[in-house]
Amino acid sequence: MATERTFSIIKPDATRRNLTGAVNAVFEKNGLRVVAQKRLRMTQEMAETFYGVHRERPFFKDLVSFMTSGPVVVQVLEGENAVAKNRDLMGATNPANAAEGTIRKMFAESIEANSVHGSDSAENAAIEIAYFFAGYEIAP
Ligand code: RTP
Ligand code: MG
């Protein structure tokens, strides 16, 4: 497997509890390099666009309100098999179902306030990275 990139968000529940470094430590310990990173507050429009695939889901309104409730840290992670590796490190969407040692098991507060987002495919990773970062902001 070649080196790959994925897109990550450290969500508002985690930035609020000062967990940016703790989450990054998990990535770095497991062979994912943070090659781009910035902290920002998502607007309602950004959150609605980003989670557009969930527009018809019952939790959509709450999700947008959660994602805009505080700062997030958006990131590009690089490494072998980065998309799948990050999904493994994150753990299940619902922390109650997340495996021991995963980020969501260790840090998530609930199925919604679950500390991190990670791209679910290489195709979506490319789209999500391009949405948040200009080429010059990514420094491998
Ligand atoms: P993400 O997109 O954030 O990486 O999370 P995921 O793939 O594990 O989960 P997904 O099904 O794509 O859901 C996106 C985010 O919506 C919130 N959610 N809330 N209240 C609920 O039942 C519910 N279900 C999902 C979570 O913040 C989830 O990560
Ligand atoms: Mg998802």
Image (spheres, rainbow, N blue to C red):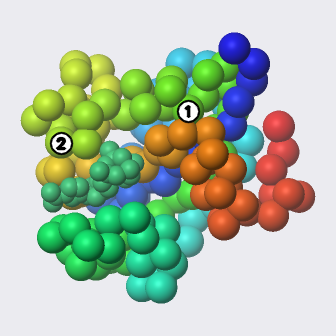
Q: Residues within 10 Å of mark 2 (few under 14, many from 20)?
A: some
- What residue sits 85% from the left and 57% below the top? 135
- What residue sits 75% from the left and 23% below the top? 3
Q: Is residue 104 above or below residue 2?
A: below
Label 2 lies in ligand 1 vicinity (Cβ under 8 Å): yes
Q: Is residue 32 above or below residue 139?
A: above
Q: Which residue is mark 2?
A: 94
Quarter holding the N terminus is top right
Q: Which residue is mark 1?
A: 83
Kindly identify the amino acid type of the residue bearing the numbered disc 1: Val
Residue at the limit of the structure toward the right, as seen here: 136
Kindly identify the amino acid type of the residue bearing the numbered disc 2: Asn
Q: Is residue 44 above or below residue 53?
A: below
Q: Position of residue 26 (x, y in %)?
A: 47, 28
Mark 2 / mark 1, whichever is N-terminal: 1
Residue at the limit of the structure toward the top, as seen here: 1
Q: Position of residue 14 (x, y in %)?
A: 34, 53
Q: Is residue 9 above or below residue 41?
A: above
Is residue 115 something one can see in this rendering? no
- What residue sits 67% from the left and 19% below the top? 80
Picture quarter containing residue 132? bottom right
- What residue sits 40% from the left and 25% below the top? 88
Quarter holding the C terminus is top right
Picture quarter containing residue 58? bottom left
Q: Position of residue 78 (x, y in %)?
A: 69, 33
Q: CA distance from mark 2 to mark 1?
A: 19 Å
